Image: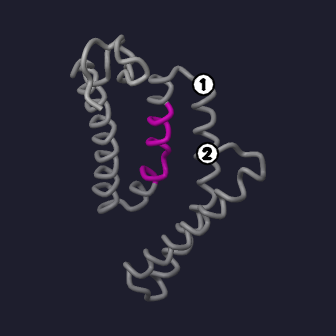
Amino acid sequence: MPFFGTLSSLGPARPKLGRCGGPIFLRPKAVGARIMLSFLAKAGFAGLTVALVTVVAKRYPGWGGLLAALPITSLLAMSLLYAETRDAEQVGQLSTSILAFIVPSIPLFIALPLLLRSGVNYWMALAIVMAGTMALYAAAFWALPRLGVKL
């Protein structure tokens, strides 16, 4: 349906208004640029974290494991969520969900080295533990709400 006339003459067919008070298609480009910059900064931090872990783990596997085990990403995600929403309850729910999904991922870290030590090819071992972890995540998605955990 083509739009002719003023916005007020369009009745129920009016374009949805954005937060800045104008139609979404007329929002300042700066808003989109700020959102994209925020996303790129978060992605860059995550990439740097993974790169740091792999560089350190090449020389010192124990220290690489410690860096990987630190909840750096979780803490950053919770901090950014709070900075963007100012909603402590939402941060608390994220923290609870993180904890709930740590448990089904633990068998991956037990099974992978056992499979590798028993001679299973790396990619096959990875596929096996990923399939098992996905099955445990599916079970967690089914069980946690029944145990009163809000996801």
Q: Earlier in the sequence, mark 2 or mark 1?
A: 1
Above or below for 127 versus 150: below
Of the pair 10 and 80, the residue shown nearer to us: 10
| Residue found farthest to the right | 147
Quadrant placement of the N terminus:
top left
* Residue type, numbered disc 1: Ala
Residue at left 61%, top 45%? Answer: 97
> Secondary structure beneath disc 2?
helix
Drawn side of residue 110 relative to residue 16, left or right:
right
- Which label is found at residue 97? 2
Residue at left 23%, top 26%? Answer: 33
Q: Does 26 lie within the magenta span?
A: no
Span colored in magenta = 66-78
Drawn side of residue 12 relative to residue 142, left or right:
left
The image's colouring method is one colour
Query: What kind of secondary structure does the magenta stretch mostly adopt?
Result: helix
| The quadrant where residue 32 appears | top left
Above or below for 135 versus 18: below
Residue 31 location in percent, x, y? 28, 21
- Which label is found at residue 132? none
Q: Which residue is mark 1?
A: 88
Residue at left 30%, top 62%? Answer: 58
Of the pair 8 and 150, the residue shown nearer to us: 8
